[in-house]
Structures are given as structure tokens and as C-alpha cells.
Image (tube, rainbow, N blue to C red):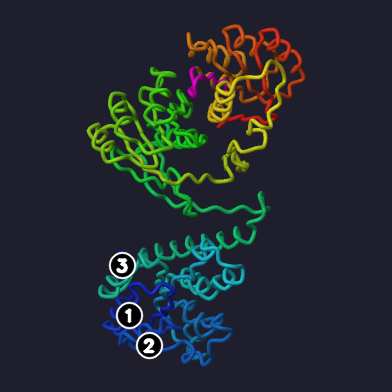
Amino acid sequence: MSEKKSFRRALVSVYDKNGLVEIGTALQNANVEILSTGSTAQTLRTAGIAVTEVGDYTGFPEIMGGRVKTLHPKIHGGILADQNNPTHLAQIAQHDIAPIDLVVINLYPFAQTISSGADFAECIEQIDIGGPSMLRGAAKNHGSVAVICQPSQYSQLVEAISDGGFTAEQRRDLALEVFRTTAEYDLTIANWLGRDEHFPEWLGKVWNRKSGLRYGENPHQSAALYSDADPSGGIVGARQLHGKEMSFNNYTDADAAWRAAHDHSAPCVAIIKHANPCGIAVADSIAQAHRKAHECDPVSAFGGVVAANREVDAEMALTLSEIFTEVVIAPKFSAAALEILIKKPSVRLLECESTQISPRELRLVSGGVLVQQTDLVDAPGDDCVNWVRACGPEVSQSVMDDLVFAWRSVRSVKSNAILLAKDGASVGIGMGQVNRVDSARLAVSRAGDRVRGSVAASDAFFPFADGAEILLQVGVSAIVQPGGSIRDEEVIAAVQAAGATMFFTNVRHFSHA
């Protein structure tokens, strides 16, 4: 452990005054001279702590409403002087600059200001200039200066004041936190100024490590969970009420399930396994929706992840308690439901009230990242009023309801995707096949006897009539698909020959991730 460096002089200038008096008291008790500014100095002085105003020290007053307070050579020279460099020491002595050993600063709350809906001028005023400049200077010169940039570090600082200062290793760690903090601060400003650009020339993003994970997709892969620096909730912000720690695969499946359930406005349950749905259903009650979703593919649902877009009640919990389930995620769990489910030690219960989904998706590829608008099933063609009836008779309202349900559900299925639905529930799902014919066969085989009278949704057009023919041969009564194939007329002819109906949406919902 390297030798600790004590403090003789500290510069303290903070926006967040929480814990300030405790720091000032500790510094005063250790006979550390305190330089400070504006309201920080006033708070310390009111508490009976001796303070030298920066303006009195530099001989230059605060100007421009506080925009210029610390941007002065006597401040930055004191921060940046390498106290082991004789030339630096001679120069600061020549210019009557006092070396500064400790810098305590937290920044103007820019992120909170823009989130509050403040007008442009107010947001501009909350861009801190002097604070980041001093923080970066102190972090660069951490061989001579200790720097504190977060209130969460105050207890560590108070301990160091009474214990003779920080070691070189500790000062390096503190410097690292500064550069992380100022990088995030600048990213927030840059992204805000370019907020009207969907795909800006420069894209910056910050994630903060929330927790380590036991492993990744497989035991030989190490992994960790990072949260978006923008407080938007989502799966990472969900509150875990019960169960073991979430795994990497739990998170990916929970996210897929949560999105699938929230593609629907009616009470909906989605059951996901390996990022693919094995059952989706809507109903008048959430318990009924769960039963219907589970009936789609009970074998695959074993060990799955269940998402509900309504509160989980006791009735749904009783059914869940009889099925091995990895994760259940919902906006809320009733007290009775919790009482039932916490008796199962293996199930993880997540409460996630946020339905906010990022408008952009990022996907890492070798050497870069792909960015796209998130597929939210909200394009004009996703509304059935804009569908084109390509062939066949008009359908009843119940059939149209099933077509709408199937279309909104097929988005969550990995391509090539075919989803069969009846009475507001998936009855057969064909996913992830490299041709649409095999996806149709898989969906039909999963549906079994339930296929007759069902409707089908295809995430992309049928390149040939063969995929549609497989569905029609077993009694599918109506199909909804994007259309747009050069062989659309062949597909239309096959549907007409079967006496079925087909709609074109002119929207595709490929899902490859």
C-alpha cells in the first residue's frame, strides 16, 4: 500500500448540498483550509465553518450570473501543479498560487433538468463548465490531488480526512470515477442537442454495471448486467420480489415476454422459451389469458418465462403454482398471488410497472453497431382498417379479431414466422425456420386438431403458394400477411381455390435477433 497524502487545502463547490456540512466539519477539524464559491460557501459559513471565497482568493469576482467563478489561473494552477515537480512548485510560488490537495465538486443537474421538461434556455444554463474543468484537472493530476465527484463518496472522504488522506491507488480510483462522470455528462448534453436526429453522425451511450451474473448464455461465458444511464425503467429496472438471482437467459426471455404481452391492450399473457413464444393469449381476465396461452404448447411452456400485462391475481397464481416456471413478470402481484407463489422457491417474481420501450434498438455486429427504429407494431399497416382484402369473402367480427390478434402476436416470433390463432389464443407457432414452408408445417403440427377454423399470420410474404397451401389444406379459414411477392397472384389463387380469405398489410415484421 502506497503512502497516504494528507490535505492542506481543499476546494469545495457543490450543487447538491447533502452531506456538505459533514465534509466541512471534518475538514475544519483537520485544519484544512477551505476555498469555496457562492451558495456552497454560504452553507458552510452558516454552519460555523471557516471558508475563503474563491473571489477573495483570486481577486476576481464572480461574473455573468455565476457563469465565471473558478475559471482562473490561481484555481487551475493550484489544481494542476504537480507537487513533485520542482519547476511547477517554483512557478506557482512565483505567481502566488496555493497548491490544492483536494477537490470536492458535484455538477449542475443537467440530466434532471432536461427530464423535467424545462425550456431550452434553462437547460443551457444547467450545462456546467467550471465544475467539469476542475474535476478533469484534478483527475489528471491525481498524483497530487484527490478528487470527489459524487455524494456517495462523502463517507469515504470523511474517513480519509481523519486517517491521513488517500493512497495513490485510491486517488487513481477517484480519478477514474471523475472521467466516467464527466464522459456521461458530456454524452447527455451531446445527445440532447441532437435529439431531433434519428440517426446522428455521432452516437454516444452510457451503461452502468448493475450486477454480475453467474454466467452468460452458457456456463463457460462470463457475463454482467448493465443498466441504461437514462432512467427509463424496463426489465433491468424491474423489482424482484422473490426467487433466485436472475440469469442471463432469464433476462433475455423476460424482455421478449414483456414486449410480447404488451403488444396487446387486452389482458394478455405471453410464455417465452429461448426468446420465442410458445403461447400467447388475450382474454377477459388475466387468469383466463394464462390458461389459454399455456394450452398452446404445454410441453414447451415447462421451464418458460411468463409475462402478464395486468396484475397477477390469486386465480392465475394457483395455476402457475402447478407449472414449473422460471420467471413471472407483471406490473403487479396481488397479496394473495404473492402468498401462493412465494411457496415455490425456484420461481423468480418480477414487478415491472414501466411499459416504456426505447424507440431505437442497438445490435452489436463485428466492428460496429446496427441502429434501427424499434418495431412497435404501430405502423399504418398494423391497423386492420388499412388492410387490403386480397381475396375471399368478408369475415365475421370474431375472425377479424383473431386475425388482428395473430398479426400483433407474430411480431414476437423469430423469422420465418407463422402463427395460428383461434378465440384470442395462439394454437400453433412455427418459428425460426429458414424457409416459410417449414414454419407453416411446424405451426400446423403444433396446432393438431385445433388447426381447423383457425386463422394464420405470416411475418413476411409467401414467396410461393406452397406455404399458404399447407395452411389451407388443414382448414385455416383466413390469412393475414404483408403481401408484396412477385408471386402474390399464385398465392391469391390458392387461397381463392380453398374458399378462404386473405388480407395484405403492406408491413413486414421480420425478427432475426
Q: Give the range drawn in magenta.
A: 414-427
Residue topped by disc 2: 51
Q: Which amino acid does label 2 sit on?
A: Val
Which dot marks residue 156?
A: 3
Q: Which residue is drawn at 62% across and 17% down?
A: 478
- Which residue in the protein does label 1 denote? 24
Crowd rating for badge 3 (residues with CA inside 10 Å; few <14, some 14–19, many 20+): few
144 w.r.t. 207: above or below: below
Which label number is shown at residue 324?
none
Please state which of residues 454 and 162 is positioned toward the viewer in this rendering. Answer: 454
Q: Are marks 3 and 2 in contact (CB under 8 Å)?
A: no
Distance between mark 3 and mark 2 Cα atoms: 22 Å
N-terminal-most mark, 3 or 1: 1
Amino acid residing under circle 1: Gly
In terms of sequence position, does the residue under pointer 1 or pointer 2 come before the other? 1
Which quadrant holds residue 319?
top left
Foreground tag (3 vs 1): 1
Q: Is residue 431 above or below residue 28?
A: above
- With 395 as the anchor, is 159 left or right in this view? left
Left or right: 508 in relation to 114: right
Pointers 3 and 1 in contact (C-beta within 8 Å): no
